Image: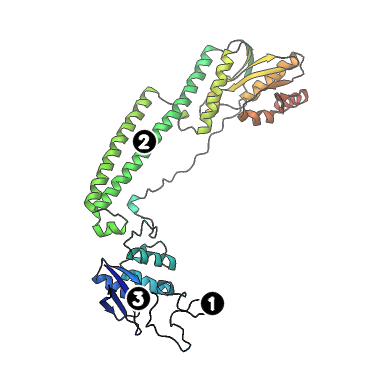
């Protein structure tokens, strides 16, 4: 039913439909009058008429309560209706409309109160309009774990690193490198499966908590939390979702268990950050090139015989060119008991000595990967149009620096 609202000269409100008087409310407040009328005729649509021919005039002939314009005269403009209300008045109107003011996103903001009242009268959902606070249910919130971040262990520089020049690297040492590289690759894949299980477990637990909350709550409490559907329908829907998540979680756990069984990863290589995994992948490619190279190789080993770094090099016209240089994979991981520092620097120092013996005064050249440029710059290399170069003077500085340590 479409009803029009008129305000008489006495201030009372008249509701008419097709010219027929339906209801009279003696209150001078239109919002109270509308709320009273809707309580009797809830399915009605009300059209308010701003212009009332019976509205009283003041001594100057202006409409009372009209205002409008910069000079305050005329029938149109000015604050009328909800716009003229104070915050406390809007809150009272909202309560009469059946709105819980405390659930609004800003209960003391006129714009929010006005929008909520209008939306309620139009039968619109307040949550969809973004007028309510986010649902905060303590049982659904996950308490963060209190963990103290551990400082990463820094490997110590090993003074017992021994360089040697060889044509073929030791097979046992190559096998150890390949094994460590595989641990890093498996660790990356293991992290992926573990994240899938953790995410699935969190979703399943939260859905179960939400289901328990729905079962314990009354229909009215569910509506206050923003649920639109009935309690029975919500229970059925969340139960199906929980069963689906449980099934998927069990499948992910099985995949994780099978991977752990077939590809065991030592604890030293678990939970490696992504940047270390990427460095290890690049290092493995370089390592494969070193193995396949038909050039002389520099091998850096420690006192226990572990290969800590390897490089292949060739002689050019006036320098030694380092084709490839790779550090051991456990040095990239940094948590293995075999990890050490200074192996790459030791290989460069050995190349400088080879260059001096060949009559090149320690001059070196190489074409590094972009990520390795800071390392070589720290040793004294400078970038040129065809790669990086260690000049004879920079080579002498590097040797003195290493000897003084």
Q: Residue at x 24, y 71 (%)?
A: 40
Give the Cα separation between the discs numbered 3 and 2.
58 Å
Q: Which mark is residue 30?
A: 3
Mark 1 element type: loop
Identify the residue position indicated by label 2 in the image: 197
| Dot 3 alpha-carbon crowd within 10 angstroms: few under 14, some 14 to 19, many 20 or more | many
Q: Earlier in the sequence, mark 3 or mark 2?
A: 3
Q: Residue 207: tell me if it is visible.
A: yes
Q: Tell whether 404 sits left or right of 67.
A: right
Residue 86, given in percent of the width and then of the height, sits at 42, 74
Residue 192 against residue 122 in the figure, above or below = above
Mark 3 vs mark 1, foreground winner is 1
Residue 359 against residue 57 in the figure, above or below = above
Mark 1 vs mark 2, foreground winner is 1
Residue 321, given in percent of the width and then of the height, sits at 69, 18
Q: Which mark is residue 70?
A: 1
| Dot 1 alpha-carbon crowd within 10 angstroms: few under 14, some 14 to 19, many 20 or more | few
Residue at the far front: name it. Answer: 18
Question: Quadrant location of residue 378?
Answer: top right
Q: Tell whether 386 sits left or right of 259.
A: right
Q: Which mark is residue 365?
A: none
Q: Earlier in the sequence, mark 3 or mark 1?
A: 3
Give the Cα separation between the discs numbered 3 and 1.
25 Å
């Amino acid at each position: 039913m479409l009803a029009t609202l008129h305000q008489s000269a006495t201030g009372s409100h008249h509701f008419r439909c097709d010219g027929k008087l339906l209801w009279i409310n003696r209150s001078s407040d239109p919002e109270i009058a509308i709320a009273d009328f809707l309580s009797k005729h809830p399915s009605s649509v009300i059209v308010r008429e701003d212009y009332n021919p019976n509205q009283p005039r003041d001594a100057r002939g202006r409409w009372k309560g009209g205002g409008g314009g910069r000079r305050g005269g005329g029938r149109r403009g000015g604050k009328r209706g909800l716009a003229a209300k104070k915050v406390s008045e809007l809150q009272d109107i909202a309560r009469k409309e059946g709105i819980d003011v405390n659930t609004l996103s800003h209960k003391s903001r006129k714009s929010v109160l006005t929008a909520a009242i209008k939306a309620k009268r139009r039968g619109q959902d307040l949550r969809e309009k973004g007028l309510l606070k986010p649902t905060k249910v303590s049982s659904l919130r996950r308490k963060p774990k209190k963990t103290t971040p551990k400082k990463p262990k820094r490997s110590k520089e090993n003074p017992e690193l021994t360089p040697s020049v060889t044509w073929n690297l030791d097979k046992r040492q190559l096998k150890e490198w390949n094994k460590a590289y595989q641990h890093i690759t498996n660790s990356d894949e293991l992290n992926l499966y573990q994240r899938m299980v953790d995410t699935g477990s969190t979703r399943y637990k939260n859905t179960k908590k939400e289901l328990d909350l729905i079962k314990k709550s009354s229909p009215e409490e569910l509506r206050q939390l923003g649920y639109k559907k009935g309690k029975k329908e919500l229970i059925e829907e969340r139960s199906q979702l929980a069963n689906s998540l449980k099934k998927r979680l069990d499948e992910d756990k099985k995949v994780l268990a099978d991977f752990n069984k077939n590809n065991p990863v030592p604890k030293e290589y678990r939970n490696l950050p992504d940047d270390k995994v990427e460095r290890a992948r690049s290092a493995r490619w370089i390592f494969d090139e070193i193995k396949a190279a038909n050039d002389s190789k520099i091998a850096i080993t420690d006192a226990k015989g572990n290969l800590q770094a390897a490089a292949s090099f060739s002689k050019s016209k006036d320098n030694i060119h380092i084709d490839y240089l790779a550090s051991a994979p456990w040095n990239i991981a940094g948590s293995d008991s075999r990890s050490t520092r200074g192996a790459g620097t030791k290989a460069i120092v050995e190349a400088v000595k080879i260059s001096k013996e060949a009559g090149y005064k320690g001059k070196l050249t190489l074409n590094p990967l972009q990520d390795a440029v800071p390392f070589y710059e720290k040793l004294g290399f400078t970038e040129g149009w065809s790669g990086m170069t260690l000049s004879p003077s920079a080579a002498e500085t590097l040797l003195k620096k290493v000897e003084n340590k």
